[in-house]
Amino acid sequence: MAGVSMCMATIAFSIYRYPGIVAAPVASKFLPLFFTCMFWYVWLALRLGRAATRDDFVVLHHGARWGVVIALAWIVEVVGGSLILPGSPVGPPATIVAVLLPAVAGASGTAVTGRIDTGARIGFWSGVLSGMITFLAMASVGYLAATFPELLREQETPPDIGRAYTAAELGTYYIADYLASGVSHLLIVGALFCSAAGALGGLFGRAFGSLVRSRQAQWLNH
């Protein structure tokens, strides 16, 4: 709920600071998706955000822990690849790590419970948390880009940069662009992809857990 509040405050402040965001072409796509996503997250937090069983505790504990790690990987990709070291090889490895981590998270939880759905649930919650953290990071990078546009790579400038842009127009472009990317992390890269990756990792986690338990039983019998 705190994360949802921060994301909502970020959107509200951005619209207040750069009203042109609402009229930007990309806003017609990311704003409805953003508010739908926020409503969904609030409903899920109220319904499923408490640990009623041991499996629920495993899901929420692993989801929170891995969500932070996944978000850090995406932040390295966004900040390192776009601003601090533009054109460096930092971005692709960070992306690969961020993509693989939800499967690792799902496998780690399923190895404990033996249930594949545990992996999917861990993937979902880790995606929700990492998505919100990454959204806030993307918004921060957008404000940094609006203030210091020279930090960005050439391909990230407006397509018709040949004409004279005012500071407000450049700020609106960068903020809208990064907010749209952040919203994709909130839902597509976050909850949806991470849930699927967590379920896939759960398949491996259950197989690995069964193998470990089988070896332990054989060792005890001997």
Image (cartoon, grey):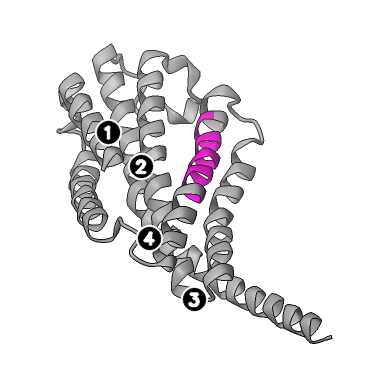
Label 3 residue SS:
loop
Q: Which residue is mark 3?
A: 115
Pick the residue in front: 117 or 96: 117
Mark 4 residue type: Leu
Q: Quadrant of residue 173?
A: top left
The alpha-carbon separation of the residues under discs 3 and 1 comes to: 33 Å
| C-alpha span from label 2 to label 1 | 9 Å
* Residue lying at 33% horizontally and 64% vertically, measured from the top left: 52
Question: Given contact means CB atoms under 8 Å apart, are the residues at marks 4 and 2 in contact?
Answer: no
Find out whether the residues at labels 2 and 1 contact each other: C-beta distance under 8 Å. yes
The answer for how far apart the CA atoms under marks 3 and 4 are is: 19 Å
The residue that label 4 is drawn on is 192
Q: CA distance from mark 2 to mark 3?
A: 27 Å
Q: What amino acid is labelled 2 in the image? A: Met
Numbered range of the magenta stretch: 66-79
Mark 1 = which residue? 6
Tag 4 secondary structure: helix
Q: Tell me which label, 3 or 1, sits earlier in the chain.
A: 1
Q: Is residue 222 above or below residue 176?
A: below
Hey, what amino acid is under mark 3?
Arg
Question: Callout 4: few (<14), some (14-19), or many (20+) C-alpha neighbours within 10 Å?
Answer: some
Which mark is first along the chain, 4 or 3? 3
Q: Are marks 1 and 4 in contact (CB under 8 Å)?
A: no
x, y percent for residue 38: 22, 47
The disc, 4 or 2, on the residue closer to the chain's N-terminal end is: 2
Residue under label 2: 132
152 relative position to 88: left or right: left
Work out whether residue 68 can be spotted: yes
Is 104 on the left-hand or right-hand side of 161? Answer: right
- Mark 2 is surrounded, within 10 Å at the Cα level, by few (under 14), some (14 to 19) or many (20 or more) other residues, namely many
* Quadrant position of residue 2: top left
Between the C-alphas of marks 4 and 2, the distance is 13 Å
